[in-house]
Image: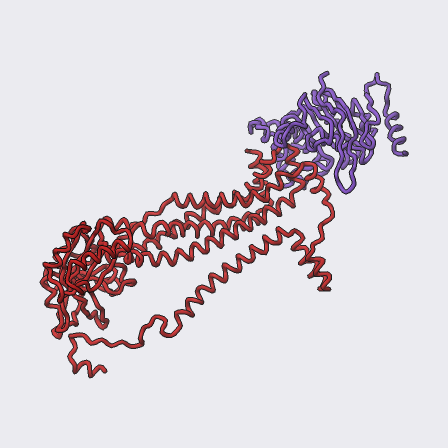
Chain colours: A purple, B red
Amino acid sequence: MNTRIELTNVSKIYNGGSKQVGLSDVSLSIPSGQFAAIMGPSGSGKSTLLNLIAGLDRPTSGTVTVDGVSLGGLSEAALARYRRQRLGVVFQFFHLLNQLSVLDNILLPAQLAGMKTATARARARDLLDQLGIAEKAGAYPARLSGGERQRVAIARALVNRPAVLLADEPTGALDSRTGEQVLDLLVEVNRGGQTIVMVTHDAKLAAAYAARVVSLRDGRILDDAQMQPSSGRSVSDLMQLEIKEAGK
Amino acid sequence: MKALLTKILGDLRRRRVQAIVIFIIVTLTAGVGTLGIEVLNGSSAPFDQAFNQQAGAHLQIAFDGRVVTPDQLAATTTLPDVTASAGPWPGSILPFANGTAKVLLRVLGRADPGGPVDRLQIVAGHWASQPGEVVLTRSFAEASQLSVGSQLTAISRLDKPTLTVVGEVTDIDEADASLQSLQYAWVAPSQVAGLLGPSDHVDYVMLFRFRQAAAAADLQQDTQEIEGALPPRAVANTLTYLVVKQIFTVNSTIILGFLLAFAAFALGAVVLIIANVVTGAVLASYREIGIIKALGFTPGQVVLTFVGQMLIPTLAGCIIGAPIGVLGSIPILNSSYQALNLPATTLVSPLLALSTTIGILVVVSLFATFPALRAGLLKPVAAITKGTAPGPQRRSLLSALLQRLHLPRPLSVGAGDAFARPLRGLLTALAVLIAVATLTFAFGLQSSFQKVTAIPGFFARPDVSITRYGAYPDSTLMQTL
């Protein structure tokens, strides 16, 4: 498989009151079409990793390469174009635009990418159908439940058929049943060939849905596990790891 | 582009109160600004146009008939700088009675209204060709409630000859009767002698056009040349077209001063409100700025979302305000035409309205762009983080100071919060300052005018003025006194 995302010796240090390490010398390669979960406790660097892949932040050192393009050399405008053409991002707290209807929220990235209005509308309607919220097209986010909002966020992330879908704790603000529904959706999307990088702190979910689980702690990769049956790793192994790390 | 529009329209729906305020104040600014510029452009143009059409005189001179003869005056027409002339026409300043009202008119004996200089335009009736007929300026006729067929009584003589108004004209060489009290009245040349009283004498009026007449200095030199060609003290009175033009534009100039002052105040308020609204919108939208950047908005597009939110109500305000300004300028310019006895043929310039609109849009864009740049420069992650979980609020220095003064807590907290963001606080204070200054200007100016004009003797007019005309013998005068 081709390498879709490559991080080489990436470090991120935040210059706040005291210098805080976000990531420390991380190297990671994610092939095209893989469903990878990034796992770890709060402050382990999961979201930092995702932000660097999304080009929302820049590494202090090292390189982030997506589809052979090094993000470090891109201007802010070029990074914005990169995001609109290649990425879909799903956030933990949905981050929908409250003043736009559900349909307009989903159409916005398509319009940015220059998709024809009729095509974009058809695609948005199709996604709303698939996600079971077709009747909410004209509603505003404030009127939706958490699960519905996250579905809208997923539809918005998928409308441009991005090569990479980044999901930052997509189930973090949802109840377990709705969370499972959302993850089922992501698996279905992944079956279509899209690369998914999902950040989660839930080992059970990571093992159940992702093909690969990368565990982070204090900005370093602690474990990188393939979840295929042949790998010999199981959910309980991961949970053991999680419990062990939590006890340190 | 479509994404930008979707975002801008969505934001406008949310900030509709601010949008309505901007729309209203821009409508006023565009209206007053367009009105001012149209008046500025149109106030002198009709004079120049009509002056050329009617071959107006660069210089009008009244000569003392006791010092010069018509033959001597005729020689001035061949002076090197003179390109055209009319006259000499015999005449005099004579008193007339219109009912109980008494007026002075400069009566001229003129055979026809045409000629190389001062082609009078007859707007009612016909030219005075026989004794007993008189032609008046339209503005004088209107002001005196006279029309063709009305009668004026010459009170310069005891026999009080009566003249019938047979025509009304517009004259480029004199201002409106309300601004220039001594108006021309034309009679047949043979009539003049029959109107003079025992103490009156004949004057001669000549009109000149010169090669060089653009400046007052040119006209002064031309006047000196004519004076030099005649016996001393031959020139009794002169009037240049520059003075007439100044009188013509005096109303427009006064109105223009007010309009431009109000337009400047309004534009100042617009830019302060725009800067304040955008600064506030950026501060309140960190989370959204981060989200749209994550979706793929470039920094430039982020700036445009804020600028666009200001430009849409601004454009709407200009679309409504500029035509109102154009329409409002028509009666003002028409009154300027009437002041010069010209037919109202006001032509407003849509290009000026368009220029005003473009000017306002450019100014608004500039003042919206500066605060919006902050949004464009924000890092996406920092924007989302700050917007979702704002950090500790800065403590206002004013708040700390007020607390130290032991002022009531609501006052120290409220006043302190108002200046927690010093730039926004300053912008708000400036907007209030402009509003107060505008109101003070509007009401203060009017009351100042009223107070000034109420000062006794301001216009240096006596309470009672008695003039004895030739038509009244000594016995009548003594009886009146």
Q: State whether residue A125 appears in this view.
A: no
| A59 w.r.t. B444: above or below | above
Apparent side of residue B134 relative to residue A65 in the rendered image (left or right): left
Q: Residue at x 59, y 31 (%)?
A: A112
Position of residue B280 measured from the top left corner of the image (x, y, whole percent): 62, 47
Q: In which quarter of the image is the C terminus of chain B?
A: bottom left
Q: Residue at x 50, y 59 (%)?
A: B438
Q: State whether residue A24 appears in this view.
A: yes
Q: In which quarter of the image is the N terminus of chain B?
A: top right
Position of residue A3 measured from the top left corner of the image (x, y, whole percent): 72, 19
Position of residue B323 measured from the top left corner of the image (x, y, whole percent): 41, 47
| B116 w.r.t. B403: above or below | above
Apparent side of residue B478 relative to residue A21 in the rendered image (left or right): left
Apparent side of residue A164 relative to residue A230 in the rendered image (left or right): left
- Identify which residue, A180 or B451, lies in the foreground: B451
Place residue A34 in its image quadrant: top right
| B280 w.r.t. B462: above or below | above
Q: Which residue is drawn at 25% across and 57% down?
A: B220
Apparent side of residue B106 relative to residue B325 in the rendered image (left or right): left
- Identify which residue, B87 or A54, lies in the foreground: B87
Number of labels in the image equals 0
Position of residue B2 measured from the top left corner of the image (x, y, whole percent): 55, 33
Place residue B199 in its image quadrant: bottom left
| B114 w.r.t. B378: above or below | below
Q: Which residue is drawn at 24% across and 62% down?
A: B140
